[in-house]
Image: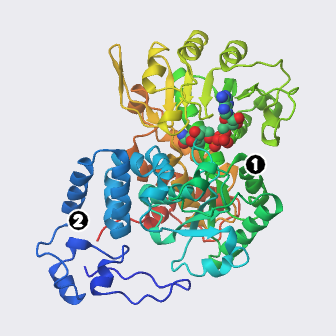
Amino acid sequence: MIAPVRATTPNSQAPDSPRGLALLRDPLLNKGTAFTEAERDVLGLRGFLPAHVLSMEEQVARVLTNLRSLPNDLEKYIALNSLHDRNEELFFRVVCDNIDEIQPLIYTPTVGLACQRYGLIFQRPRGMFISATDKGRIAELLGNWPYPAKLIVVTDGERILGLGDLGAHGMGIPVGKLSLYSACAGVHPEHCLPIMLDVGTNNQDLLNDRYYIGLRQKRLSGAAYDEFIDEFITAARAAFPGVLIQFEDFANHSAFRLLHKYRDDIPVFNDDIQGTAAVALAGLFSALRVNGGKLADQRVLFLGAGEAATGIADLIVSAMMAEGLSEPEAIKRNWLVDSRGLVVKDRAGLTEHKMRYAHDHAAVEDFLTAIRTLKPTAIIGVAAVGGAFTPEVLQAMAEINHRPIVFALSNPTSKAECSAEEAYRHTDGRALFACGSPYDPVKFDDKTFVPRQGNNSYIFPGVGLGAIASGTKLVTDEMFMAAAHTLAYLVTQEDIEQGSLYPSLPRIREVSAHIAAAVADVAYRRGLATTARPNDMMAYIEQQMYDPHY
Ligand code: NAD
């Protein structure tokens, strides 16, 4: 096949298909040493490539050989990034075919380290950097983007994973996340646009860092910040009609506000709040298959009271209500512990998003006492406090429950509440465990457990694909609930028997396709879709999935 020609669109700058060196330097069209003899003749490539023609499979093998010889994960991240910049099809083939090995390198946990070093490892821009100094001309900037974006992942870098304010260095997150959209759900790379809204940083170390790539000023705040975001949203919708916007790694005080401000009018969602919620709920459904419980009977105690915790709690409440509880009854089954102890009604200065879970209860200062007092059936760690699930915490859960549910979801690995090995060891191998960071299988007594990551990457790619395929006007909680049910449904008996609460990662494209179909189905049923309902939903979804090949 002759090299593909990039689609021409209203937003593109009418690219005539490049030839010769220009073709080799275009990452969307470059095939490197895989250009065939015929292509080399037709496309003016003679003399630019060594004689031997490699197949894509041989190129993939070469990439993996190189990658595995590198000394550490950051070097591997850099190598993969540079492949992404050279040859997108090959990059995505490598990721799709080796998702278990590559996802932790291009996303969590390695991306956290990459963001911390972003100024040093920065090689080539990807996506768009829109800074506070661009106020008033954001539409003009977005007009420079040459591809037809259908999905924007945008951050302001204020709360990158559990690492805090990394300013413009947070760009690694939208870039990594969009790679997963393409690899895990087949959202075409041309439709993906990562955006850094560089409103400054309050991280003094970065402001002092000579290699910091962002704007050297304190963050915009108050009305100036809101006006900037508003201008961006308006410009993005004008430049890319119907575009789905995913808010990513905004700090609490912006994340909840922005989500609530826009979610009833335009297709937006916040993955830290809603995607996390769906993946955690799916994990609970799987755990309940093991211990035979009903969701409506669970008592869930969160360590953390931020975006992830309240997002998960909100979705659990909706799911408990679907099982017949009243809203107050469901809320009462979810408790939060933050840095000041149990969130209770009498506590002064509680922020808005915690109020729903501020119960009538005496103050409790620490997590262990909260466990002994409330006797939860499940604990969910989303506070980014490494090691917070101490042996005593785990033992207390094992004393109260025959099969305690323990989710240590914080990222990166250094922030994990406990390791998989600790979770099994301190509960006599009885924990129903999910983690935010990848862990190897754990041998305990005569059993080998295969812990799996409760990673949003099971959810957001499929949600995004379903939203785009249906052209939904809004992204609703019902869609996330459907995603959670679908994900749990795809966990096999064999998974369950080895302690895995999620399907294996190599099944991710199948998982995403099913989630996309479930999400699109909600859009069609609720009258939110802007495309015609297909007769065969799965076939329709699968048709839209980008599959990297030459
Ligand atoms: P956040 O900043 O919104 O919330 C953190 C919360 O932890 C805050 O409520 C804070 O008060 C609380 N906290 C801080 N120190 C504490 C302490 N010592 N004891 C108890 N609580 C404390 O962040 P978030 O978006 O909710 O994310 C939290 C963590 O969860 C991060 O590490 C993030 O990477 C991780 N996360 C993982 C996944 C996943 O897929 N596994 C998804 C989302 C978030």
- Mark 1 and ligand 1: say if the CB distance to the nearest ligand atom is below 8 Å: no
On screen, residue 215 versus residue 69, left or right, reads: right
Callout 1–callout 2 Cβ contact below 8 Å: no
Coordinates of residue 256 in the picture (x, y in percent): 74, 49
SS category of the residue bearing label 2: helix
Q: Colour scheme of this structure image? A: rainbow
The amino acid marked with disc number 1 is His
- Residue at the location (52% across, 58% down)? 210
Coordinates of residue 462 in the picture (x, y in percent): 52, 54
Q: Nearer the viewer, mark 1 or mark 2?
A: 1
Residue that carries the numbered disc 1 in the rendered image? 253
Q: Quadrant of residue 220?
A: bottom right
Can residue 309 be seen here? no
**Ligand 1 shown in quarter:** top right
Distance from the alpha carbon under mark 1 to that under mark 2: 47 Å
Residue that carries the numbered disc 2 in the rendered image? 56
Q: Residue furthest top?
A: 399
SS category of the residue bearing label 1: helix
Q: Residue furthest left?
A: 51
On screen, residue 523 versus residue 415, left or right, reads: right
The amino acid marked with disc number 2 is Met
Q: Quadrant of residue 143?
A: bottom right
- Residue at the location (65% across, 16% down)? 368
Coordinates of residue 1 in the picture (x, y in percent): 25, 79
Q: Where 370 sits versus 165, above or below? A: above
Tell me which label, 1 or 2, sits earlier in the chain. Answer: 2
Coordinates of residue 25 in the picture (x, y in percent): 33, 77
On screen, residue 101 versus residue 411, left or right, reads: left
- Mark 2 and ligand 1: say if the CB distance to the nearest ligand atom is below 8 Å: no
The C terminus: image quadrant: bottom left
- Residue at the location (11% across, 72% down)? 52
